[in-house]
Image: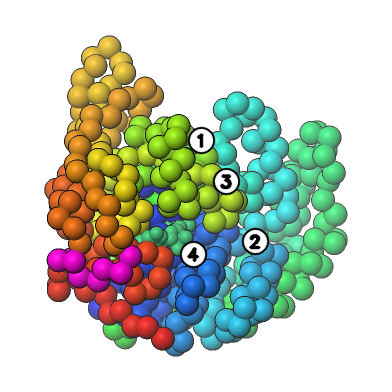
Amino acid sequence: MPTTCVIGLLWGDEGKGKIIDLFAAEADWVVRYGGGHNAGHTLVRGGERLVLHLVPSAILRPGVRNVIGNGVVVDPFHLRDEIAKLRQRGVTVELGTNLLVADGAHVILPVHRALDGLSERMRGDAKLGTTGRGIGPAYADRASRAGVRIGDLVRPARLDAALHRLLAEKNAILRACGDEPLDAARLRDELLELGAFMKPGIVDAGRLLREAHRRGERILCEGAQGVLLDVDHGTYPFVTSSNASSGGIASGTGLPPQALGRVIGVVKAYATRVGSGPFPTELDGEFAHRLREAGREYGSTTGRPRRVGWFDAVAARHAAQVSGTTEIVMTNLDVLRGMGSLRVARSYRLANDSGAEVEHFPAFDLDGVRPVFDEYAGFDEDLTRMRRWTDLPANARRYVDAVEARIGVPIATVSVGPERDQVIQRSAIQKPAIQNE
Ligand code: GDP
């Protein structure tokens, strides 16, 4: 049984939470493979919104095992709070039963948060616009072999060695910057307490997943952020610090690359971006405000207003190709109602001397590119109650067809509202089972 993966194709916030929840109806395991609690996936159940940050999106599905894979960076303080909040909302979260955490996942410590803020301050106007949660510094320590891992939290001698390694250097930096050094003994006690809390759920996740895969169980890998935020294939340096594209799955879960079969890329019917960095199709002014309000485009983690723009087929095509996307889900088509004629960027005109029009994504020449748009007639109908492709107004169908042709990958599913059942299947072949509780 090939593993399925759901990833965002652009800059995140494509509505992956709902789509993962939908496809999780067919999964035995749902695995996060990268990112941290900077992700924010929104599920809507009976009109009630539930935002998940670290806990995988199938936590509402009874019988599914949710795994935080080794490629994720875990803030254990945050995880404990998130679990407590979910339980308060009546969601069953049992470590060791429906929630597992890879022992190899790296730990985000308070010092990583402090260093995140410090590095953004030092960058001044060139700041990246990170969520300030210590994700980047934790990944940096992983790469420089100074990190603490989840498995260390239940092994006091290993934890001591790891903290010694890390804090000698970090406290010297904090002191040099005039910040408070960390109290190693207090941190050790807190981490051991968190380790005891998490212990029933701490596992060798890679081994469990490989065994499950061999048994033919169905595994769904849940992407965080989007391909254009991938540290290697995104708009560097305005990217996240992990491989958000499907390329991060083998290293971030312990599954072999051959296990991956179906790659579902999620796009919104228009584009959004949070934080700094190139955004060729960005809109501003009154129209941008209307689109932002219609799509409720405010960050689910930070509450920041998202930048909004027209659909960018150049960027989406690049992302689909890099990630091996086999089918696309387009969300938020309902939001484009009443927006007048709709635009899709089919190519860019470069701002450099050549002024050339290019159809590929020019990663090193994005500054000042001007998108070349195709224009399509819009639609005024409310799509939120439509459930069949043929129910959609002809102009909406034409728009979806045009985007599909530009990306070159089938748009198999269209989403017309936040609720689980607000989806339209375009073809019988790629049909996720839609089950309502
Ligand atoms: P994620 O990080 O990719 O999961 O995206 P978010 O959850 O941050 O943002 C998606 C937002 O759009 C959430 O508020 C969803 O409930 C909502 N949403 C998802 N699909 C649709 C859709 O088709 N139409 C509308 N109007 N909202 C949607």
Nearer mark to the viewer, of 1 and 3: 3
Specify whether tag 1 is near ligand 1 (CB below 8 Å): no
Q: Nearer the viewer, mark 2 or mark 1?
A: 1
Q: Earlier in the sequence, mark 3 or mark 2?
A: 2
The amino acid type, in three-letter code, at marker 1 is: Ser
Question: Disc number at residue 42?
Answer: 4
The residue at which mark 1 appears reads as 276
Q: Residues within 10 Å of mark 3 (few under 14, many from 20)?
A: few
Which residue type does callout 4 highlight? Thr
Q: Is residue 320 above or below residue 312?
A: below
For ligand 1, give the image quadrant: bottom left
- Badge 2 element: loop
The first of marks 3 and 4 along the sequence is: 4
Which residue is labeled 2 in the image? Answer: 75
Which of the two marks, 1 or 4, is nearer to us in this view? 4
Q: Which residue corresponds to the image point at 83% horizontal and 46% vertical from the top-left?
A: 181
Q: CA distance from mark 2 to mark 1?
A: 24 Å
- Which region shows up in magenta? 384-391
